[in-house]
């Protein structure tokens, strides 16, 4: 009897064990934080909006670091974080693949190239019923404009090392480095392709832009760049910048540095851009990156009064005046530093200046302004032989934005060196702390004009390639990019 | 729901199968006593061999048991005594059973599975146990603190001296880089969480940027909620052969905590009252300035003019960390029970005053453990506890706003009284930097309030119990639930606050954790007495099913720019964040333990099959097998009582992390009111699987001279493969990394414990315990490039951990300048100790006992960034001492800082953290009975105790204490000393009264 029960018990126990594990349905737990591409793409139209906002958001997240980093390199600003001196020394003192400067301004734009890759896949994969041919074309024009823009950020900091321009589907695939000239030519090729795509893109994008493209941020005259036609003018403004860079650098296909070929193209680009000579438009019209104090938004990282980012102590050298007052751009953008210089021991330098340009956590940062376009036109006109036109543009900016006396006929008589001096002065204060000074001095071969704060500091021509990239390529990066 | 029932029902049904007929019964009474003193052995368990009858001895050692009317054998066990078996004939009505002291703990009960145990003597793996009495001699801030120096094979370190605790137990070296580094904690069968949650202070300190929470926030790991006073004993399973039944959560060992339970007898009421205080073990002081030296740091003439020529000196550190407030603890317990019902109830109220201004910790807990027998076949037990821990954590560690006091002190020459308020109540403005630590700690709030419930229940059914066969079926289940409520408030008027242009910061950081685990177990014990299996002493087969769920929901809201006087998050600019995870697990296991040849040979084999929701293929079972064997040689030569040789091999795993398996896009936040979605930083891997550890363990346990000398020696060798690793992807591909399995870690070490009982007389007993532990962890192979260990340090300038093939995983890597001036990033020093040793001495003379515990750590380097702060601020206490090389620096401090050369010579601030600490001293006196009897209310006993923790440290370490870590609990390395909360020593006076 007992034996029988014993057997029965054992059998029941064994059966239970065989049924072990219950149902594996219990094990299905989603990733609560992150959407899958399947979840996103179930509605392609909303997917395109999410991903477009992703591209714009990633772009916005790059700009603060780009301006402050190139600002340190161009001696416009300091990163004065008292508890972390490497925020500054890693850019101007010890600069290598591992330093704070060396690892910066690289991964961000490439992440955005991946975002653009995903965006293009979804756009191209959408059925005609969801997305019309015109809408697809507009979306691709947007994506390719942004692809060019991201690569411009990269090549601006890496310069002669060159860069990678191709994104592949396999995340483990390693795309090759190409030369600086190839990158520039790739960028202009993408911009022209995008221009053509936008041309067949109908009137409206199948997604909404951020506040940086819409009035009133985009300009006092209320221009909004969110229609396909107006975004096309942004594309041409960027192409004008790229062509001016190509011309001044003498990129393959543009002839010797400062020769007319690509400057002529730049002039064409500018005529198709949003350039405006209306005085009210000169400083305010442009594309901005918006910031906000709202939840899960980002606040302006460069705003005045935030401890870390202050102005360089020689920022006032060479500032002009009209006899009575200093250059209005200087007084508008720079003020006395009111902090306690707590970082002096770490950085070894004390400054007396602070930025005044971006007030408040929601202030937008400029990325492509009308004032630059006028100066680009001055530059392009000069080097294509229209000296009077060039000085007229220069004077327009000088008088309206800087409150300074015009050069007039004296300007037309400038030697090339004098013109470049004048151009760089206007660019320095018109585009102060917008990420231009270091790049401008470099493309005109004048980096040596930058002041050295300490004997141990150095003038950096280009940032190296970050260690993470070097390691994965076994150090195989051209032009000593991993040093 | 239906699905879960479908897997539970079959086993529940088996519980109702079969019910054996009752035999005729008789009563037998008896007494269990200590053969040395003839005193009764209270609480001894008397059970019938081959039956279900059992009884527990009362306070005088007396018991009454119901037995069948045949000849039977009784087995008697009592904690601290060797067990005994006696034969009781059918005619016998009373029995006297003498027990001898178990000095070497050979008869200690060792848990081997969900429902099985064996004695330490028969264990074929190394086991460490700590009893409740040993644990609670000196009050501790947390359980990890109380365990320090008591477990061989584990490195137990506190992260700082902040009230509320926070510490790490690392068992047998480094086992993982990305997976869990924490042991599994199981309390009365419930798997509990030991997570640590930040209060959100990072929003103010910005140690890790502007986010709410960071590992640098000195969080409390939630083991701190477990009340050490309730613990009967702790068993630490180290060997994979023992932990294999816990599968993929077991590479870091398993800590089994058993709480106290009631025993049969009249209700006993016990009260313990403790008073004491905490004191900073060591403070540093700072540089004494004169007019010249101050002039190099400040151009403020009002400061320099008060120097004549020496500047005034204010002892900031003593002012801020010299609080010495009264700490106290009250513990009350009631326990007792009848033959069928036993209960243990305890209540604790504890307050620890911190050494830092306005920091403290309050604990309250209530526990109820009940055991109920329904019949000899059916028993049930329940354990439930409710606890509350409220910690005002103070400020410490890394920071980027100078709110961490030692950080601010490093750069603030102590020449002006910062701890002074003017007539309006305003604190002195710090002329050196924008923060006044005295003001901060007066007004800043950084608190965590945790309510926790842990409960478990067991139902046991014994359908069959004969002399040869016993079958037990049991259902064990339990849950652990808590909510941690972290609150930070920094008012806008604090000197550092206007920095971000948004004065006033408040953070609400909550974590809700819920864990459930349940198992169904079947145990068959076979005890052949004759026949062809007669060589077998016993064979225990157990099998079971287990399910587990772990859910965690964390949400934080930061608010900046507050309305003055308001500390709620709804009145500022808010940044919310949320993180949720859930893990589900299903497993089955089989466990076989065989004793043979008169219990000389012990064999064990076990296997667990498991699948869970975090592995890539959720359908697939992973198997974790283990086996072990030991043989005891009894009296092999004169004076040798017994020599046991043992060998074990086992496997265990470490789970993938939540969402490692998922390839997704990621939310990037908001832009102009729209949600942004883009590429994630880390790409998931749909093929991810658990890390796998294989361990071999060999050991010998010996006792000599009638148990006066016991020696345990173990060698272990662990190989961990399929490591979870972040394989870097090219940044130009748009991703940072992907999670993969690969590589191999190797860890080996030895553990030695020597227990000597040199004097044992009726009045005087002296017990001496020496432990030695050495472990080394290597990176054997690595399929990815060497990489920096997350949260291990602050870059090559200061030293940080790096995983590189062929190197020890515990090395500190940093910059070294070579002869030719080039700077290389290289392995500099080992952060792991060469070895640790403990020396414990327990003396008792009549009613007096004295316990002394020393803890020695030899070697183990730290990144002494606290020193770097003070040197960088030209403010270290020894700054003006003679420079070893004046061509590098004019004074000692300048020499160190210049020699460090902006981090090109990281070794300058890496320092040996060897120490010897007087961990614990306890002097206790049991009052004579005649005094006790005079106490109204009928007291039974009264004990007075003086105790102290960390009373002395011997160390050449420059900073506060080598036993700190800025990053809290970490898997691989912990060596960053950066402005910590100063470690403490404590002094307590206790009174225990029993009624």
Image (tube, rainbow, N blue to C red):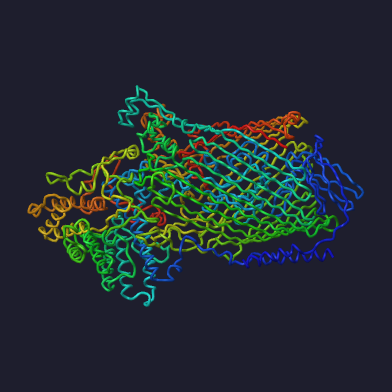
| Picture layout, residue B926 above or below residue A300 | above
Quarter location, residue B18: bottom right
**Foreground residue among B799 and B818:** B799
- Considering every residue shown, the one lying at the far top of the view is B308
Expressed as whole percent of the image width and height from the top left, the position of residue A332 reads 22, 48
Q: Specify the quadrant that holds the C terminus of chain B.
A: top right
Left or right? Give the position of B797 relative to B142: left
Expressed as whole percent of the image width and height from the top left, the position of residue B981 reads 49, 38
Q: Specify the quadrant that holds the N terminus of chain B.
A: bottom right
**Foreground residue among A267 and B563:** B563
Q: Is residue B143 visible?
A: yes
| Identity of the residue drawn at 63% across and 57% down | B517
Quarter location, residue B899: top left
Left or right? Give the position of A155 relative to A34: left
- Considering every residue shown, the one lying at the far left of the view is A409
**Foreground residue among B958 and B665:** B665
Count of numbered badges drawn on the protein: 0
- Considering every residue shown, the one lying at the far right of the view is B91
**Foreground residue among A85 and B377:** B377
Quarter location, residue B38: top right
Q: Is residue B971 visible?
A: no
Left or right? Give the position of B824 relative to B963: left
Expressed as whole percent of the image width and height from the top left, the position of residue B474 reads 72, 58
| Picture layout, residue A286 above or below residue B147 | below
Expressed as whole percent of the image width and height from the top left, the position of residue B636 reads 78, 42
């Amino acid at each position: 009897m007992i034996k029988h029960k014993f057997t029965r018990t054992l059998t029941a126990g064994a059966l239970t064990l065989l049924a072990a594990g219950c149902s594996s349905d219990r094990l299905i737990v989603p990733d609560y934080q992150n959407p899958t591409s399947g979840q996103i793409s179930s509605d392609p139209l909303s997917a395109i909006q999410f991903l477009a906002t992703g591209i714009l958001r990633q772009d916005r997240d790059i700009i603060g670091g780009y301006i402050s980093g190139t600002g340190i390199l161009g001696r416009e600003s300091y990163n004065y974080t008292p508890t972390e001196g490497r925020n500054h020394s890693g850019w101007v003192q010890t600069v290598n693949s591992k330093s704070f400067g060396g690892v910066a301004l690289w991964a961000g734009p490439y992440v955005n190239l991946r975002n653009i890759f995903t965006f293009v896949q979804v756009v191209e994969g959408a059925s005609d019923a969801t997305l019309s041919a015109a809408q697809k074309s507009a979306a691709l024009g947007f994506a390719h404009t942004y692809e060019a823009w991201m690569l411009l950020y990269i090549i601006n900091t890496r310069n002669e090392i060159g860069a990678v321009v191709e994104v592949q589907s396999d995340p483990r695939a390693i795309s090759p480095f190409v030369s600086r000239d190839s990158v520039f030519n790739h960028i202009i090729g993408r911009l022209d392709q995008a221009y053509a795509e936008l041309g067949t893109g109908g009137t409206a994008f199948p997604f909404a832009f951020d506040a940086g493209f819409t009035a009133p941020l985009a300009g006092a005259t209320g221009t909004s760049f969110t229609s396909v036609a107006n975004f096309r003018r942004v594309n041409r403004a960027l192409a004008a910048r790229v062509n001016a860079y190509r011309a001044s650098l003498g990129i393959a296909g543009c002839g010797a540095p400062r020769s007319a070929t690509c400057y002529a193209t730049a002039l064409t680009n500018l005529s198709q851009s949003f350039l405006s000579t209306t005085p009210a438009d000169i400083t305010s019209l442009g594309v901005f990156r918006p910031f906000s104090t709202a939840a899960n938004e980002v606040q302006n990282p460069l705003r005045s009064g935030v401890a870390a980012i202050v102005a360089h102590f020689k920022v006032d050298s060479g500032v002009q005046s009209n006899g009575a007052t200093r250059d209005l751009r200087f007084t508008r953008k720079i003020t006395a530093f009111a902090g306690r210089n707590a970082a002096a021991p770490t950085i070894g330098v004390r400054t007396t200046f602070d930025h005044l340009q971006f007030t408040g956590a929601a202030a937008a940062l400029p990325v492509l302004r009308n004032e630059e376009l006028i100066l680009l036109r001055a530059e392009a006109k000069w080097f294509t032989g229209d000296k009077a036109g060039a000085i007229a543009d220069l004077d327009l900016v000088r008088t309206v934005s800087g409150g300074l006396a015009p050069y007039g006929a004296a300007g037309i008589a400038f030697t090339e060196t004098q013109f470049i001096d004048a151009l760089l002065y206007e660019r320095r204060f018109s585009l102060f702390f917008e990420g231009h000074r270091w790049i401008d001095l470099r493309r005109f071969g004048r980096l040596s004009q930058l002041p050295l704060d300490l004997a141990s500091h150095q003038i950096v021509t280009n940032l190296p390639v970050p260690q993470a990239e070097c390691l994965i390529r076994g150090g195989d990066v051209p032009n000593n990019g991993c040093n | 729901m239906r699905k879960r029932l479908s897997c539970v029902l079959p086993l529940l049904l088996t519980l109702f199968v079969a019910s054996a007929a009752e035999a005729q019964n008789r009563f037998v009474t008896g007494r269990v006593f200590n053969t040395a003193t003839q005193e009764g052995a209270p609480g001894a368990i008397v059970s019938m061999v081959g039956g279900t009858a059992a009884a527990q001895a009362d306070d005088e050692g007396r018991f009454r048991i119901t037995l069948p009317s045949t000849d039977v054998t009784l087995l008697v066990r009592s904690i601290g005594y060797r067990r005994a078996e006696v034969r009781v004939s059918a005619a016998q009505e009373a029995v006297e059973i003498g027990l001898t002291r178990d000095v070497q703990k050979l008869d200690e009960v060792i848990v081997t599975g969900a429902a099985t145990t064996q004695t330490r003597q028969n264990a074929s793996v190394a086991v460490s146990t700590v009893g409740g009495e040993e644990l609670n001699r000196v009050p501790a801030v947390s359980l990890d603190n109380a365990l320090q120096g008591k477990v061989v094979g584990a490195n137990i370190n506190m992260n700082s001296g902040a009230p509320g605790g926070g510490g790490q137990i690392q068992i047998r070296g480094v086992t993982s880089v990305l997976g869990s580094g924490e042991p599994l904690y199981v309390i009365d069968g419930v798997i509990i969480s030991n997570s640590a949650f930040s209060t959100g202070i990072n929003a103010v300190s910005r140690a890790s940027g502007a986010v709410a929470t960071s590992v640098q926030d000195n969080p409390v790991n939630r083991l701190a909620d477990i009340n050490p006073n309730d613990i009967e004993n702790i068993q630490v399973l180290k060997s994979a052969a023992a932990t294999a039944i816990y599968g993929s959560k077991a590479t870091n060992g398993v800590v089994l905590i058993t709480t106290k339970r009631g025993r049969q007898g009249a209700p006993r009421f016990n009260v313990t009252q403790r008073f004491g205080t905490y004191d900073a073990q060591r403070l540093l002081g700072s540089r004494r300035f004169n007019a010249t030296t101050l002039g190099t740091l400040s151009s403020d003439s009002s400061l320099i003019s008060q120097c004549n020529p020496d500047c005034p000196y204010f002892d900031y550190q003593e002012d801020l960390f010299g609080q010495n407030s009264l700490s106290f603890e009250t513990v009350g317990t009631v326990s007792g029970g009848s033959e069928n019902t036993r209960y243990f109830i305890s209540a604790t109220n504890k307050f620890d005053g911190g050494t830092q201004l306005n920091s403290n910790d309050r604990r309250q807990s209530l526990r109820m453990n009940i055991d109920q027998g329904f019949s000899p076949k059916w028993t049930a037990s329940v354990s439930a506890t409710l606890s509350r821990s409220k910690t005002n954590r103070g400020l410490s560690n890394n920071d980027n706003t100078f709110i961490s006091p030692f950080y601010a002190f490093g750069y603030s020459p102590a020449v002006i009284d910062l701890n002074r308020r003017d007539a309006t109540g305003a604190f002195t403005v710090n002329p050196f930097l924008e923060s006044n630590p005295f003001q901060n700690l007066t007004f800043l709030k950084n608190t965590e309030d945790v309510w926790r419930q842990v409960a478990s229940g067991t139902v046991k059914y014994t359908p069959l119990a004969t002399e040869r066969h016993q079958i037990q079926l049991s259902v064990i289940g339990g849950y652990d639930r808590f909510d941690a409520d972290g609150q930070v408030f920094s008012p806008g008027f604090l000197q550092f606050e206007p920095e971000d242009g948004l004065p006033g910061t408040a953070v609400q950081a909550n974590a809700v954790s819920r864990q459930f685990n349940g198992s169904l177990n079947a145990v068959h014990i076979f005890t052949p007495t004759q026949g062809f299996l007669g060589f077998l002493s016993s064979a225990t087969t157990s099998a079971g099913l287990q399910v587990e769920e772990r859910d965690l929901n964390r949400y934080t809201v930061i608010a900046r720019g507050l309305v003055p006087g308001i500390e709620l998050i709804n009145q500022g600019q808010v940044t919310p964040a949320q993180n949720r995870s859930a893990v589900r697990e299903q497993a089955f296991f089989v466990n076989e333990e065989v004793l043979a040849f008169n219990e000389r040979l012990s064999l064990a084999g076990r296997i667990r099959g498991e699948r869970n929701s975090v592995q890539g293929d959720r359908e697939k079972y992973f198997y974790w097998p283990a086996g072990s064997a030991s043989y005891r040689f009894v009296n092999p030569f004169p004076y040798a009582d017994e020599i046991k040789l043992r060998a074990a091999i086992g496997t265990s795993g470490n789970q993938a992390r939540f969402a490692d398996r998922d390839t997704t896009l990621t939310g990037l936040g908001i832009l102009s009111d729209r949600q942004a979605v883009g590429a994630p930083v880390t790409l998931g891997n749909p093929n991810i699987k658990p890390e796998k550890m294989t361990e071999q363990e060999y050991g010998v346990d010996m006792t000599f001279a009638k148990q006066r000398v016991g020696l345990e020696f173990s060698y272990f060798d662990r190989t961990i493969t399929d490591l979870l690793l972040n394989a870097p992807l090219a940044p130009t591909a748009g991703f940072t990394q992907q999670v993969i399995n690969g590589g191999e870690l190797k860890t080996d070490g030895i553990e030695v414990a020597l227990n000597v009982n040199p004097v044992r007389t009726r009045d005087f007993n002296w017990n001496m315990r020496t432990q030695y532990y050495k472990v080394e962890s290597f990176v054997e192979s690595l399929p990815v490039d060497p990489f920096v260990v997350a949260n291990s340090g602050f870059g090559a300038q200061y030293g940080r951990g790096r995983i590189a093939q062929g190197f020890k995983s515990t090395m500190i890597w940093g910059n070294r300048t070579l002869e030719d001036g080039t700077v290389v990033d290289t392995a500099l020093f080992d952060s792991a100790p060469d070895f640790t040793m403990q020396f414990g001495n327990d003396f008792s003379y009549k009613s007096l006992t004295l316990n002394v515990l020393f803890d020695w750590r030899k070697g183990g380097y730290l990144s002494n960034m606290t020193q770097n702060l003070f040197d960088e601020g030209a403010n270290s206490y020894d700054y003006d001492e003679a420079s070893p090389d004046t061509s590098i620096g004019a004074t000692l401090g300048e020499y160190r800082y210049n020699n460090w050369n902006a981090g090109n010579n990281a070794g300058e601030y890496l320092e040996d953290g060897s120490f010897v600490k007087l961990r614990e001293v306890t002097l206790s006196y049991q009052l004579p009975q005649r005094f006790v009897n005079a106490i109204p209310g009928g007291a039974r006993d009264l004990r007075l105790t003086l105790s102290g923790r960390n009373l002395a440290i011997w160390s050449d370490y420059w900073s506060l204490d080598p036993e700190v870590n800025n990053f809290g609990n970490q898997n691989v390395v912990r060596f960053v000393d950066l402005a910590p909360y100063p470690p403490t020593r404590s002094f307590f006076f206790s009174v225990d009264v029993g009624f």
